[in-house]
Amino acid sequence: MLTRQQFCTFFVNDRFFGIPVDRVQEVIQWQDITRVPLASNVIEGLINLRGDIVMAVDLRRRLAIGDRPATVAPVNVVVRCADGPASLLVDSIGDVVEVDQGSFENSPPGLEANMRSLITGIYKLPGKLMHVLDIDSACQILNDGEPA
């Protein structure tokens, strides 16, 4: 019997990503962000999430995709990292999808170097590929100060 897993999906530029639903704390619209002086450019700043201070990581910069157009407000996907919550700034949110674990494939060899360490693999969905984001690698910047 195949095991099924649910993923919260989102878009960064034209790429489609998924993260396990059990690692998502919540999805919220744009929040005011306080800049952090001398922080890596991957760190957009800090948000106040009902009294908790949460680091906001810009996934466009983390994936070296380029800056978001000024006319597009990012969405906060608050995830559970090893050291607590972090907000991943994405362009838009998708749906929750359920996939068979048996359809998981390793990352394609031609995947860009900047994405290789952040993607654990892919699922082929009707009409698109879902890249599975490694949340712990994406949050690595919170521990080291610079992207891994």
Image: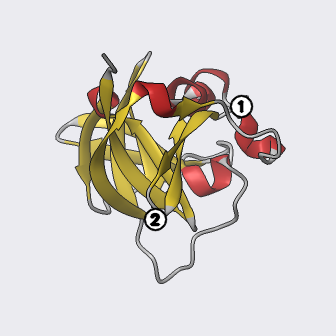
Q: Quadrant of residue 86?
A: top left
Residue at position x 34%, y 59% from top?
93
Q: What mark, if any, has residue 117 been given in the picture?
A: 1
Q: Residue 12: percent from the left, percent from the top?
A: 53, 60
Q: CA distance from mark 2 to mark 1?
A: 21 Å
Can residue 32 be seen here? no
Quick check: can you spot residue 70?
yes
- How crowded is the residue under tag 2: few (<14 C-alpha within 10 Å), some, or many (20+)? many
Residue ranking furthest to the bottom: 71
| Residue kind at label 1, given as amino acid type | Ser
Of the 4 image quadrants, the one containing the C terminus is: top right
Which one is in front, 100 or 94?
100
Image position of 25 (left or right of 108):
left
Picture residue at 57% right of the left edge, 68% below the top: 14
The x, y position of residue 64, in whole percent, is 73, 54
**Which residue, given by chain and number where applicable, does mark 2 sit on?**
91
Mark 1 residue crowding within 10 angstroms, few (<14) / some (14–19) / many (20+): some
Number of callouts: 2
Quick check: 37 left or right of 50? Answer: right
